[in-house]
Amino acid sequence: MYVFNFSNIGFRHINGRTVLQDYSASYIDNERTIITCADGHGGKMYIRSNLGSKFASEATINVLKRINKEAISKKKREITATSIRLSILCEWNSLVEQHLNNHKIRKKEIANLDDCQKFELSKRPRSAYGTTLTGAMAIGDKLIVVSIGDSECLGIKKGEIVTIFNNDDEPVGNVTYSMCQEDAFNHLKVSIMNIKELDGVLLCTDGLSTPYQSYDNLNESFIKPTVSRLKLDNDYSKIRKKIKSIAEKEGTGDDVTLSFMLFDHLKVKYYRRN
Amino acid sequence: MNDRIAKEKLNVILVVDTSKSMAGERISQVNQAIRDIKDYLVNLQVENSNVDFYLSIIQFSTESSFINDNREVNVDKFKFDNLKCCGWSNLHCGYQKLEEILKKQSHGGVMPDFGGTSPIILLLTDGHPTTTEYKDELVNLNNSPWFKAAIRYGIAIELHDKRTMGVLKDFVGDNGDVIDCYSSSMLKNIIKIIVLTASKVKSSSATVGNGQVINQNQLVRQEINEALADVDQWGW
């Protein structure tokens, strides 16, 4: 299996002297492979979103590590999916609480906020850590995928993109669901499927997807060349170089993150560009 | 995507009543406004490295259609033949066309699958719709995330009828305003103020972070209201 994760700061954040707000990770043991990808919100109020995305990633790995093959048997699948949603949110909120207890929000951090935003943060300090989250775990012959917000969870199969979640009713135009909102449980989605249904799964933040605008363009101009080159030369450094270029030069200036796992049954012939 | 800075896409959509009552001064003002808007947006696109502007013109009378059969076209390539008027005012047909394009590209619409800026939509009419079917079509439109996010303006052309003002108010909802154009000689300038102000504000903040779009729409409304307040000083 090919496993990859990488994040690169975007040129708008470099120019604005802010930090990388995306976060990604991967975890591999004898039983499972986990990848994550999270996009800390860029709005002014989200002063600790770089930590929010890191905690979202950690929470996901911690929770998915506790899932065993038995828990995703057909009978238990629904209960397990609900439990994963709840556990990830509890774990994330707990990490945020811990951090807030040890690092109170300082005046310096909120100096640029207006009174309304300051009031909002004093009421709900965890908003400071607002982030999206996507994650995937391959365990045995099953795949678990989780998602909240406008980062993408894309399956690939025989050279085509397969959308894992229906996002037709998701907000559009720079509005997104977030780990920090009160009703996050209603928007955190979990899907459990057979690995054979896909050749691989890709998670990415909008810094990568937005410049390509459409699924077709993303597939033809990025996914297919990435997959076919990797299968040919096994060189991950070229992918990191491309992501760096999108973040710092070609893209919208947002941070760019890509995580993926490609399964052994993937056939490269489907990923040659049309 | 080539080796260049990727641009955001900003759709400007005009839904124009071309029923018989719009003939004469009214439609000629609309036609001139569309030409002026095109020229302005081409310049704005050249100046602004962040945004590409796309125009969609939907005309509705007895039936509805896109100008030149183009559901959207980059302002740079936009070609325009004057709108002509005849027939009834079947607003529901216009709403159907609007709904058709306010979908993601992968679902047959013109909005991007990823990212994107909420569009600017302008509805112009001078009379009450011929049938009531527009109500059902508006329900469908209100289910579209892109319609909900769009900044929406209604222009009431020489209308002195509360019922029709209600139709326009339902269209804009909480995401825009209805402007009363009490003389058709003002129409061209009112259309231009709305489209150009909204385009300028939206294009200058097209890449703001998450959660900012609501404030952005409020900013657009504020700027438009200020521009329209100066209307008496324009010496029309």
Image (cartoon, coloured by chain):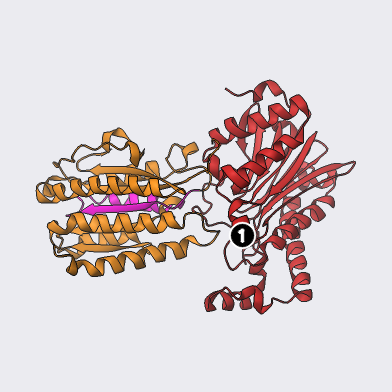
**Quadrant including the C terminus of chain B:** bottom left
Looking at the image, the residue that sits furthest to the top is A269
Q: Position of residue A170 (x, y in %)?
A: 54, 52
Tell me which corner region of the image, top left, top right, bottom left or bottom right, holds residue A29. Answer: top right
Q: Position of residue B201 (x, y in %)?
A: 39, 59
The residue identified by callout 1 is A41
Task: Look at label 1 and name its amino acid.
Answer: His
What is the drawing colour of chain A? Answer: red
Q: Secondary structure at mark 1?
A: loop
Q: Position of residue A44 (x, y in %)?
A: 57, 66
Q: Position of residue A203 (x, y in %)?
A: 67, 44
Viewer can see residue A253: yes
Looking at the image, the residue that sits furthest to the left is B24
Horizontal side of A96 relative to B209 (left or right) equals right
What is the span of residues highlighted in magenta in the rendered image? B116-145
Q: Is residue A32 magenta?
A: no
What is the drawing colour of chain B? Answer: orange
Q: Determine the chain carrying the residue at label 1.
A: A
> Relative to the observer, which residue lies in front, A209 or A158?
A209
Image point (62%, 34%), residue name: A222
**Quadrant including the N terminus of chain B:** top right
Q: Residues within 10 Å of mark 1 (few under 14, many from 20)?
A: many
Q: Is residue A31 above or below residue A220?
A: below
Viewer can see residue B171: no
